[in-house]
Image: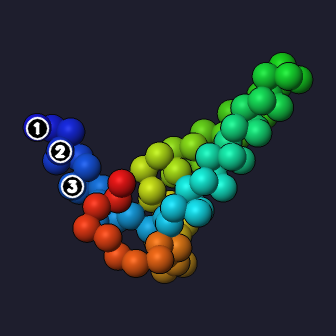
Amino acid sequence: MLFKKVVIMNCNKCNIGAIDRVFRLIAAAILIVIGYLFESWIALLAIPPLLSALFAYCPYYLIFKLDTRLSTPKSCA
């Protein structure tokens, strides 16, 4: 039940579209691979795009009033 409440609360704030989410996931994957190959901290830079892609929410988009969704769906899935 708690999970449903979190999802419902998050759906009102979705501002990242499907294409944007894919680009963020690809960027995060690339940063993780580079960090792993070079044994570097650069993999930590993958955390923000990974989280924003998973939750379909970007706080910077909220500040600048951006929304990359093609339409306004009822859920953020």
Marks 3/2 in contact by CB < 8 Å: the verdict is yes
Secondary structure under badge 1? loop
Q: Which image quadrant: the N terminus?
A: top left
Q: Amino acid at mark 2?
A: Lys
Which numbered marker is on residue 8?
3
Element type at mark 3: helix
Query: Residue at the spot x=25%, y=49% of the render?
Result: 7
Q: What residue is disc 1 on?
A: 1
Residue 47: image quadrant is: top right
Where's the C terminus, which quadrant?
Answer: bottom left
* Mark 3 to mark 1 CA distance (whole Å): 11 Å
- Residue 4: which numbered mark, if any? 2
Query: Between 12 and 73, which is closer to the camera in this rendering?
Result: 73
**CA–CA distance between discs 1 and 2?**
5 Å
Q: Are marks 3 and 1 in contact (CB under 8 Å)?
A: no
For the residue carrying disc 1, how many other residues have a C-alpha within 10 Å: few (<14), some (14-19), or many (20+)? few
Instruction: Tell me which amino acid carries mark 3.
Output: Ile
Is residue 44 visible to us here? yes
Q: Which amino acid is tagged 1? A: Met
Sequence-wise first label, 3 or 1: 1
